[in-house]
Image (cartoon, helix red, strand yellow):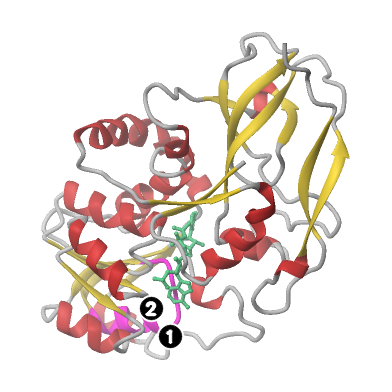
Amino acid sequence: MTQTPTATRQIVLASRPHGAPTSDDFRLEEVDLPELADGEILVRNMLMSVDPYMRGRMNDAKSYVAPFRVDAPLDGGAVGEVIASRADGLPVGTHVLHRLGWREHAVLPAAHAAVIDTDAAPASRYLGLLGMTGLTAYVGLTAVAEMREGDTVFVSGAAGAVGQAVGQLAKILGAKRVIGSAGSPEKVARLLELGYDEAFDYKETSVRDGLRAAAPDGIDVYFDNVGGEHLEAAISTLTTFGRVALCGAISQYNATEAAPGPRNLFQAIGKGLTLRGFIVGQYDHLAHEYRPRASTWLAEGRLRGDETFRDGLDGAPQAFIDLLAGANTGKMLVRL
Ligand code: NDP
């Protein structure tokens, strides 16, 4: 019988980055694991997610989610297997999704873990298309941008985890045309394989020119993962009563000074545009609607998503640094 571990390894925030994070901002530590209390489980983490929002949590700034603390472990989405349990209903061997990533083992109350079915879909999908990533794409398109059949939809960051899902979901839900932008020719080619009608490399052309060429008749919906130049170009290209889901602004996450706003925001007046921000957690009530639909679309092969894997807890900081620089196609995950 394998012995229950009494210690584990975790990544702590060593310092708050100025600009782009570096490996010096992280530290690997070995720590003792606490004894399980009643109602708690010990999980061996198999996979953890690195996500752009974690960059914001490295700053000491008030936001919708608490900042990471210096010298304390980072956290985030993870899936793993219960290897010791003092909780009814979560026996050893159960696979769970929880929030204590960035460590090899986690002790947590059973109430903070959700059981996942790894026979129905690979564990990684619960951190991607069947998890926060997919739900973000779905609620951004449906509840936030109120996409309608026949719309032309533009998606930035389109080859990333959320972006790949947005384009495919838009087509499934009846969009007429879907246009994506991404940061390399390989990513552009992949978008076309995934069903995007048009895609352009924003590093090869200005977003304004790329979008004009791809959408000569304008766009009805813009799903914004990037902000900055992308948002400005989209505002110019949106048709009357166009709608924008403000999902992310990754072009500004490492900025050391406030970035200028879209210089053409005034156009929103004449065109009657709606620009609406959202956090996926504000739409948790739509998860029960999304998950069964997504499971079906996945099983049918209509919804696909790439996964970029890195190995080992030691590799997690670099995976996160590389994610912000665009090394991933689809969801970036770390195998532990
Ligand atoms: P991605 O998988 O999309 O990874 C990030 C990608 O951003 C990179 O691959 C890179 O691709 C792109 N990128 C980096 N810098 C720039 C830049 N300066 N300009 C344009 N693109 C850039 O991550 P996610 O899918 O997890 O997240 C996508 C966006 O959605 C993020 O902004 C994130 O913060 C946001 N988000 C928001 C949520 C919400 O609740 N509102 C929930 C989840 C995510 P490339 O090679 O194309 O540059």
Residue 123 to residue 321: above or below? above
In magenta, the rendered stretch is 224-237
Q: Residue at x 23, y 67 (%)?
A: 189
The answer to whether any part of residue 214 appears in the image is yes
Q: Residue at x 39, y 55 (%)?
A: 330
Residue at the spot of label 2: 231
Crowding around mark 1 (Cα neighbors within 10 Å: few <14, some 14 to 19, many 20+) is some
Q: Is residue 225 magenta?
A: yes
Residue at the spot of label 1: 262
Give the Cα separation between the discs numbered 2 and 1: 7 Å
Q: Residue at x 83, y 49 (%)?
A: 29
Q: Secondary structure at mark 2?
A: helix
The answer to whether any part of residue 65 appears in the image is no
Main secondary structure found in the magenta portion: helix
Describe residue 196's horizontal placement relative to residue 183 as left or right. left
Give how far across and how far down residue 180 sits, in percent: 26, 68
Closest to the observer, 91 or 170? 91
Figure label count: 2
Name the outermost residue toward the front: 1
Sequence-wise, the earlier of marks 2 and 1 is 2
Give how far across and how far down residue 198 sits, in percent: 17, 70
Give how far across and how far down residue 320 sits, in percent: 59, 61
Q: Amino acid at mark 1?
A: Pro
Q: Amino acid at mark 2?
A: Leu
Q: Secondary structure at mark 1?
A: loop
- Which quadrant of the figure contains the N terminus? top right
Residue 231 to residue 28: above or below? below
